Image: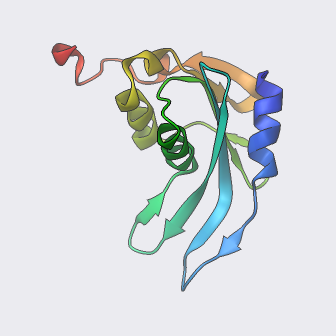
Amino acid sequence: MNKQELYQVANNYISHKKLKQFGIAGHVSCALETINGNVFTGICIDLPCSIGLCAEQSAIAEMVKNNETVIEKIVAVYEDGSILPPCGRCREFISQIDDQNMETKIILPELREVLLQDLLPEGWDNKWK
């Protein structure tokens, strides 16, 4: 799947939902493609008191549930259709799932691509590899 198609898959899952009190979900969506060519999606869930789940983490959980760990490429889309780079927590999360994910193609605004290793240099866990 090319990066425009992956973007469209993520964009299709945008669906803003109000949750209890100040909680919201679905205003960020993610699609990832594994090295086996399978696509997994997820949405964000933001709750009060900093409790929540990023769309990337949601998609990765679905991938792991299906016995895969290596991501070929990943994209997160905001409710206005713009592409969001993964936050620092998600960058680290991707890297910790599988060593090969340092080669994951991260789709950035304007459909640019960079490798995760370029966004997350000098890993804290390199001494144990």
| Residue at the spot 54% in from the left edge and 45% down from the top edge | 62
Question: Split into 4 quadrants, where in the image is the C terminus?
Answer: top left
In this picture, residue 129 sits left or right of residue 116: left
Residue 118 lies, in percent from the top left, at 48, 16
- Residue at the image point whose x is 50% and y is 23% from the top: 70
Residue found at the very far bottom of the displayed protein: 21
What is the tally of numbered marks visible in this picture?
0
Q: Is residue 3 visible?
A: yes
- Relative height, residue 4 to residue 26 (above, below): above
Q: Give the quadrant of residue 16.
A: bottom right
Q: Quadrant of the N terminus?
A: top right
Q: Is residue 81 visible?
A: no
5 or 84, nearer to the observer: 5
Q: Residue 32 appears in which quarter of the rendering? A: top right
- From this view, report whether residue 124 is shown above or below residue 48: above
For this view, does 61 lie left or right of residue 19?
left
Tell me the residue at 55%/75% (across/down): 23
Examine the image and state in which quarter residue 82 appears. Answer: top right
- What is the residue that sits farthest to the front in this orientation? 67
By what rule are the colours in the image chosen?
rainbow
- Residue 120 placement (x, y as % from top left): 41, 24
Q: Is residue 106 left or right of residue 109?
A: left
The x and y percentages for residue 81 are 80, 47
Eyeballing the image, is 32 above or below 27? above
- Point out residue 49 in the picture as x, y percentages from the top left corner: 38, 73
Residue, x 66% and y 27% (percent of image)?
Answer: 107
